[in-house]
């Protein structure tokens, strides 16, 4: 597998997190989205966006969206019998319903981030509080560390960096979740001081 990525992009970070936390072998290719190489990259992903996962053993099939990559990893690559020792867990049936709810909340955060910067809107805080109330303990899903965590982390991490104490004060469980995720070595490898927001 080849993952076309950019170290500052939160959408690409989702895919990198999932691949690293699942301990799956892959080749990482950094894409210069604003340089002359973008023309060649558009042959892989015509939108010119990252991430894109290329499956060489499947006739170079391209999965060009971060959420689709996460679903592919969960459905096709994760071993349901893997022990929960920090390895990404396959979603159970209950967790799959949760996944849909979390996707909806992530979409709200993405939209709110675009319209409210540089301040955290009331709707953004409300959505973070709803996520806070749904957490199953240290992770978002009952099964443990999962693609749900990989999907949320890049955006919640950036919100915490941009809006400061909003998480610690308004969403203490989510704040602890962020600390738990951030303490994981595989997650730390994906953090960049020159991160991009998504708006």
Image (tube, rainbow, N blue to C red):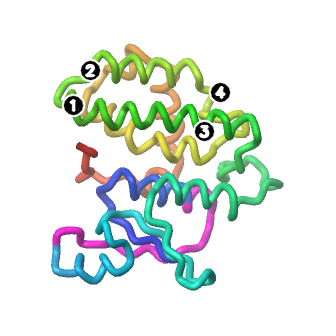
Q: CA distance from mark 3 to mark 2?
A: 24 Å
Is 23 included in the stretch rendered in magenta? Answer: yes
First to last magenta residue range:
19-34
Residue 115 is labelled as 1
Is 156 included in the stretch rendered in magenta? Answer: no
Q: Nearer the viewer, mark 4 or mark 2?
A: 2
Closer to us: 13 or 52: 52
Q: Is residue 51 above or below residue 81?
A: below
Q: Quadrant of residue 141?
A: top right
**Residue corresponding to mark 4:** 136
Residue 148 is labelled as none
Residue 139 in percent (x, y) is at 61, 34
Verify CB contact (< 8 Å) between mark 2 and mark 1.
Answer: yes
Q: Quadrant of residue 48?
A: bottom left
**Residue corresponding to mark 3:** 99
Residue shown at 40% from the left, 58% from the top: 12
Closer to us: 99 or 4: 99
Give the mark count: 4
Residue shown at 26% from the left, 45% from the top: 197
Residue 121 is labelled as 2
Q: Is residue 151 above or below residue 192?
A: above
Verify CB contact (< 8 Å) between mark 1 and mark 3.
Answer: no
Task: Name which of mark 1 and mark 3 comes first in the sequence.
Answer: 3
Which residue in the rendered view is the most extreme toward the front?
Answer: 46
Verify CB contact (< 8 Å) between mark 4 and mark 1.
Answer: no
Say what secondary structure mark 4 lies in: loop
Q: Is residue 100 above or below residue 80?
A: above
Say what secondary structure mark 1 lies in: helix
């Amino acid at each position: 597998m080849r993952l076309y990525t950019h170290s500052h992009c939160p959408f690409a970070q989702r895919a990198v997190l999932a691949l690293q936390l699942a301990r799956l072998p892959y080749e990482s290719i950094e894409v210069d989205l604003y340089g002359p190489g973008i023309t060649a990259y558009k042959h892989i992903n015509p939108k010119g966006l990252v991430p894109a996962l290329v499956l060489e053993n499947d006739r170079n099939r391209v999965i060009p969206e971060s959420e689709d990559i996460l679903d592919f990893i969960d459905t096709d690559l994760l071993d349901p019998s893997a022990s929960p020792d920090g390895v990404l867990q396959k979603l159970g049936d209950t967790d799959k319903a949760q996944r849909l709810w979390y996707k909806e909340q992530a979409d709200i955060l993405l939209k709110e981030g675009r319209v409210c910067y540089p301040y955290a809107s009331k709707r953004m805080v409300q959505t973070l509080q709803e996520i806070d109330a749904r957490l199953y303990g240290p992770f978002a899903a009952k099964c443990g560390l999962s693609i749900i965590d990989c999907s949320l982390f890049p955006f919640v991490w950036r919100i915490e960096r941009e809006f400061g104490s909003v998480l610690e004060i308004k969403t203490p469980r989510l704040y602890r979740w962020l600390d738990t995720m951030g303490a994981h070595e595989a997650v730390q490898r994906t953090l960049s001081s020159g991160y991009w927001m998504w708006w």
